[in-house]
Amino acid sequence: REAKLKEEYRKEKEKVHTKPLGMAFVTFQNEAMTAIILKDFNACQVQGCRCRQEPCSSQFSEVLHVHNWSVTYAPDPQNVRW
């Protein structure tokens, strides 16, 4: 029984790296920069990019489905299961 559980655990552990969590944490230089980026990104999402300027896209924007992103302040690190 124990060997079977260990094997199941090993298989699940291998799969973890193939399943994206669907989230990322980004660190900025300071709180002011964070607030500007958060405000601009969310304004572009709501207003269809009628904000300061068109956001820069990259060759990966479509693949990453940037149009589906939700950007918010991160939770307190104590509330994240690392």
Image: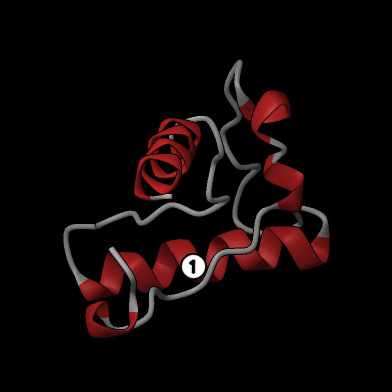
> Which residue lies at the image location 74% right of the left edge and 60% below the top edge?
45
> With 22 as the anchor, is 65 left or right in this view?
right
Indicate how the structure is coloured in the image. Answer: secondary structure
Q: Split into 4 quadrants, where in the image is the C terminus? A: bottom left
**Foreground residue among 15 and 63:** 15
Residue at the far front: name it: 1
Residue under the image location 54 percent in, 41 percent down: 20
For the residue pair 79 and 35, the one nearer the viewer reads as 79
Where is residue 37, by image quadrant? bottom left
* Residue 33 screen position, x and y as percent: 30, 64
- In the visual, does 68 lie left or right of 13? right
So how many labels did they put on this image?
1
* Residue at the spot 24% in from the left edge and 57% down from the top edge: 28
Asked which secondary structure carries label 1, the reply is helix
Q: Is residue 20 left or right of residue 54?
A: left
Q: Is residue 79 above or below residue 33?
A: below
- Under mark 1, the amino acid is Leu
In terms of image quadrants, where is residue 71? bottom right
Q: Position of residue 52 (x, y in %)?
A: 60, 56
Compared with 58, 35 (above or below) is below
For label 1, the crowd category at 10 Å Cα-Cα, with few meaning under 14, some 14 to 19 and many 20 or more, is some
Q: Residue at x 23, y 83 (%)?
A: 78
Q: Which residue is mark 1?
A: 38
* Residue 18 x, y percent position in the rendering: 52, 30
Residue 4 vs residue 56: left or right? left
Q: Which residue reaches farthest left?
A: 29
Front residue of this view, candidates 32 and 71: 71
Task: Name the spot of residue 12 as percent of width and height, x first.
Answer: 48, 40
Quadrant assignment, res 43: bottom right
